[in-house]
Image (cartoon, rainbow, N blue to C red):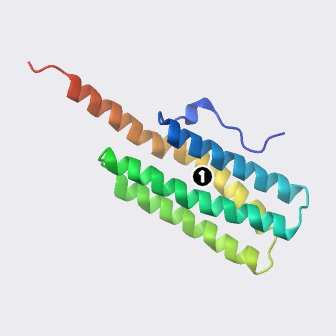
């Protein structure tokens, strides 16, 4: 059984960002499967590092996309990204210090955060983009 299932209501209307989000879901599932199967520390550590790297790359792509769209709430969105990354890096530090159960906490944190963040926060810029497009296409009176 999959730990975290991608749902169509998580689509933000950008093929690139949806692909990123799906990849993050896959990495969370891989991390969860490895930790619950009792995989070795090296394997779990490697997955955790890939997850952190990909999260950083995704945040850069998403923020660049939002900047191009002149998203009005980008500062708050970036703050949320930094807050999450800080939590994940703190958990990785604890993992590096020998607390292997932290990997399961990372899985749960990212599953919950991605599910809510994508559906609420990431979709806000989609709604704003659609609203702005509608305004721009309205013929003058």
Circle 1 sits on which residue? Answer: 113
Image location of residue 106, percent across then percent down: 70, 61
Image location of residue 16, percent across then percent down: 51, 41
User: Looking at the rendering, which quadrant does residue 136 occupy?
Assistant: top left
Residue found at the far right of this picture = 38
Determine the secondary structure under disc 1. helix
* Badge count: 1
The residue sitting at 89% across, 66% down in the picture is 40
Looking at the rendered image, the quarter that the N terminus falls into is: top right
User: Please, is residue 58 above or below residue 15 in the view?
Assistant: below
Image location of residue 74, percent across then percent down: 36, 53
Task: Locate residue 48 relative to residue 80 in the image: left or right.
Answer: right
Image location of residue 35, percent across then percent down: 84, 59
Q: Of 4 and 56, which appears nearest the observer?
A: 56
The residue sitting at 40% across, 37% down in the picture is 126
User: Please, is residue 111 above or below residue 100 in the view?
Assistant: above
User: Please, is residue 77 above or below residue 26 in the view?
Assistant: below
Task: Locate residue 101 relative to residue 86 in the image: left or right.
Answer: right
The residue sitting at 33% across, 51% down in the picture is 67
């Amino acid at each position: 059984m999959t730990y975290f299932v991608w749902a169509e209501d998580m689509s933000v209307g950008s093929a690139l960002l949806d692909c990123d989000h799906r990849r993050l879901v896959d990495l969370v599932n891989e991390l969860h499967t490895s930790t619950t199967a009792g995989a070795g520390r090296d394997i779990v550590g490697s997955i955790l590092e890939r997850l952190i790297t990909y999260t950083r790359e995704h945040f850069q792509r998403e923020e660049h996309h939002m900047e191009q769209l002149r998203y009005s709430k980008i500062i708050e969105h970036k703050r949320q990204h930094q807050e999450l990354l800080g939590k994940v890096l703190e958990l990785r530090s604890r993992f590096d210090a020998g607390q292997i159960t932290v990997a399961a906490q990372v899985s749960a944190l990212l599953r919950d955060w991605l599910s809510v963040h994508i559906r609420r926060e990431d979709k806000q810029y989609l709604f704003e983009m659609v609203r702005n497009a509608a305004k721009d296409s309205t013929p003058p009176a």
